[in-house]
Image: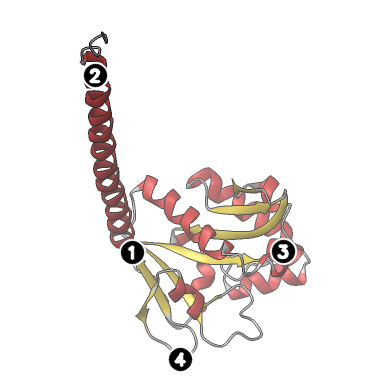
């Protein structure tokens, strides 16, 4: 299977299922969302929202493809771009956080670790920006009607989030960018140490072999017999 990750743009949004392209749980407040949905303009509104975010803030998501078929996506941006969050009981989000709004791995691709890949891609992008101290998300403990676009709290915990504000149904979860950065630095340091151990050993072995070869070459030939 060939995997690739693409930025969320109008073109890649168009490859996602209709229920993803029409979900406005985060992008609009409940009143405006109801008006748009009654008018049958949810997809157009989502595209307009994405265009604005791309213009003002830049890339706000990733789409994961397997064999050129969409397998999942992740959506994130500063909380100001998600007015729908205000309707949740654990809002507002912290001022130093970027908001992970939603993510999904489509059913036929679940169980292959792609959800973690999506989170890694998001973190990789945010680390290059350096403007945020954390990522926060509203999770849900009991998935039911109206929570299709809300990430399950157990999933958020599995990928590194901790409860920041508890709630029976909609906890606010947080992942510190500092901890992610420290983890990355520790991994890089461990790799450097490993390479530092391996390389001298190989160099020493090569030197020993070289000395042996030189010794054999320098030895005098045996004396001729009678």
First in sequence: mark 2 vs mark 1: 1
Q: Which residue is pictured at 56% across the width and 64% down the height?
A: 113
Q: Nearer the viewer, mark 2 or mark 4?
A: 2
Q: Which residue is mark 3?
A: 42
Q: Which residue is pictured at 34% across the width and 56% down the height?
A: 132
Rounded to the nearest whole Å, what is the CA distance between mark 3 and mark 2? 79 Å
Q: Nearer the viewer, mark 3 or mark 2?
A: 2
Crowd rating for badge 3 (residues with CA inside 10 Å; few <14, some 14–19, many 20+): many
List x then y, in percent, for residue 158.
46, 74
State whether residue 225 is above or below residue 190.
above
- Position of 224 with respect to 2 (left or right) is left
Q: Nearer the viewer, mark 1 or mark 4?
A: 4
Q: Which residue is mark 4?
A: 168
First in sequence: mark 3 vs mark 2: 3
Crowd rating for badge 1 (residues with CA inside 10 Å; few <14, some 14–19, many 20+): few
Image disc number at residue 95: 1
In this rendered view, identify the residue nearer to me: 143 or 105.
105
In this rendered view, identify the residue nearer to me: 148 or 176.
176
SS at mark 3 in the image: helix
State whether residue 82 is above or below residue 194.
below
Q: Residue furthest bottom?
A: 168
SS at mark 2 in the image: helix
Rounded to the nearest whole Å, what is the CA distance between mark 1 and mark 4? 23 Å
């Amino acid at each position: 299977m060939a995997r690739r990750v693409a930025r969320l743009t109008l073109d890649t949004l168009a490859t996602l299922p209709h229920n993803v392209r029409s979900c406005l749980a985060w992008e609009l407040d409940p009143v405006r969302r109801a008006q748009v949905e009654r008018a049958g303009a949810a997809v157009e509104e989502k595209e307009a929202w994405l265009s604005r975010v791309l213009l003002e803030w830049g890339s706000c998501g990733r789409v994961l493809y397997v064999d050129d078929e969409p397998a999942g996506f992740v959506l994130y941006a500063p909380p100001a771009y998600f007015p729908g969050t205000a309707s949740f009981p654990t809002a507002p989000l912290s001022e130093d956080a970027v908001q992970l709004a939603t993510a999904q791995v489509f059913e036929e691709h679940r169980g292959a670790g792609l959800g973690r890949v999506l989170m890694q891609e998001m973190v990789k992008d945010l680390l290059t920006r350096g403007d945020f101290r954390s990522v926060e998300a509203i999770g849900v403990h009991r998935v039911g009607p109206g929570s299709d676009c809300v990430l399950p709290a157990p999933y958020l915990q599995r990928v590194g989030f901790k409860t920041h504000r508890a709630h029976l149904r909609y906890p606010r979860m947080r992942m510190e960018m500092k901890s992610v950065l420290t983890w990355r630095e520790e991994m890089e340091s461990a790799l450097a140490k490993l390479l530092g151990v391996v390389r001298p050993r190989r160099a020493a072995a090569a030197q020993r072999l070289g000395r042996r070869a030189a010794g054999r070459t320098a030895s005098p030939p045996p004396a001729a017999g009678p």
